[in-house]
Structure formats: structure tokens, C-alpha cells
Image (cartoon, rainbow, N blue to C red):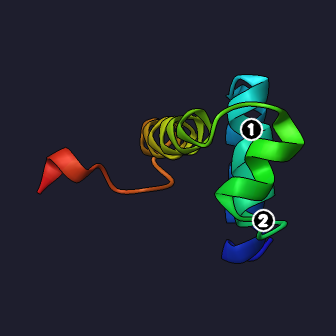
């Protein structure tokens, strides 16, 4: 299996660990390329909440991928 395929699998596994609203906001922003305003409308919540959910999703994904040693820990430097 290629490194790219492994990364995709790890990312899918990590996304599955997120709270539903974090995952949905993250996917709408990064995969569907919707704006914060469009996500806010689609999810029927304030833009500030969307920003927070996407930020938290990124942070949790990084922690998960670091724990699985897919990413090098930022604290190891």
C-alpha cells in the first residue's frame, strides 16, 4: 500500500473519531470548499461556532495522527 493511501486511511479513521458537528464542518470546509457563511447556513449555527468547530477538528485530528505516529509530534522538536 502506498504512503498516500495509508495517509488517506489514517485521516478517515481520525475523522471517524471526531464529534459529528466537528467532522461535518471540517468536511464541508476542506472537502466541499464551502465558505464559513455557507457552512453556517447549512448547519444552522453562527459563523463563530463554525470557525470554532473547524479549529477544534483540526486540533483533534493532529493529536490523533501524532498519537498514531502518522505525524511527527510538534513537541518533539
Q: Name the residue at 73% across, 31% down.
A: 45
Callout 1: helix, strand or loop?
Answer: helix
Asked if residue 70 shows in the view, the reply is: yes
Q: Name the residue at 50% across, 36% down.
A: 52
Instruction: Classify the position of the N terminus by image quarter.
Output: bottom right
Residue ID for mark 2: 34
Residue 55 locus on image (x, y percent): 48, 43
Mark 2 packing: few (<14 Cα in 10 Å), some, or many (20+)?
Answer: some
Residue 59 locus on image (x, y percent): 44, 41
Callout 2: helix, strand or loop?
Answer: loop
Residue 25 locus on image (x, y percent): 73, 44
Q: Answer with mark 2 or mark 1, whichever residue precedes in sequence.
A: 1
Residue ID for mark 1: 23
Rendering quarter of residue 41: top right
Instruction: Classify the position of the C terminus by image quarter.
Output: bottom left
Mark 1 packing: few (<14 Cα in 10 Å), some, or many (20+)?
Answer: many
Amino acid at each position: 500500500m502506498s504512503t498516500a493511501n495509508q495517509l488517506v486511511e489514517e485521516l478517515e479513521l481520525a475523522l471517524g473519531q471526531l464529534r459529528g458537528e466537528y467532522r461535518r464542518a471540517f468536511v464541508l470546509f476542506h472537502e466541499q470548499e464551502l465558505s464559513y457563511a455557507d457552512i453556517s447556513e447549512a448547519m444552522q449555527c453562527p459563523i463563530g461556532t463554525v470557525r470554532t468547530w473547524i479549529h477544534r477538528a483540526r486540533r483533534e485530528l493532529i493529536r490523533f495522527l501524532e498519537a498514531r505516529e502518522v505525524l511527527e509530534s510538534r513537541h518533539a522538536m
